[in-house]
Image: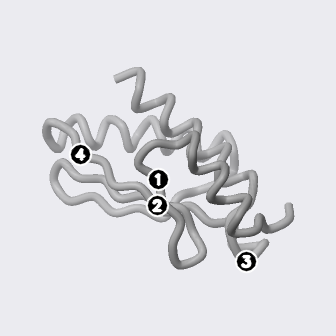
Amino acid sequence: MSKLTETQINEKLKNLEGWQFEENAIHTKLEFENFKETFSIMTRIAFEAEAQQHHPEWTNVYNTLSISLSTHDAGGVTEKDFKMATAIEKIIDTE
């Protein structure tokens, strides 16, 4: 999978509210009602990540989830990252 240019990335980010490109990855930060809801979302994302064989870098503090996506093999952001970001958005929207 080939690395996307910064122009391509910024164009694709127009379709993902709350995501931004910096430090060679796309990032978002989400807040939920409480830890239980946050962990539930993380679990659903984990199953999707396994299905796609593409795992996010993330951190969780109580009700806040920070996610970064980058394709390490390609050395930057690829279509694979946008596929995962879109899946994450769908998971969040169903909650």
Q: Secondary structure at mark 3?
A: loop
Question: Real-space Cα distance between discs 1 and 4?
Answer: 14 Å
| Residue where numbered disc 3 is placed | 75
Q: Quick one: label 2 or label 3, which is nearer the N terminus?
A: 2
Q: Residue at x 16, y 53 (%)?
A: 62
Residue type at numbered disc 3: Gly
Residue type at numbered disc 1: Trp
Of circles 1 and 4, which is in front?
1
Compared to 52, does 57 lie above or below? below
In the picture, the disc for residue 19 is 1
Nearer-the-camera pick, 85 or 39: 85
Question: Real-space Cα distance between discs 1 and 3?
Answer: 19 Å
Asked if the residues shown at circle 2 and circle 1 are in contact, with their CB atoms under 8 angstroms apart, the answer is: yes
Q: Residue at x 58, y 56 (%)?
A: 55
Q: Quick one: label 4 or label 3, which is nearer the N terminus?
A: 4
Q: Secondary structure at mark 2?
A: strand
| Residue where numbered disc 2 is placed | 27
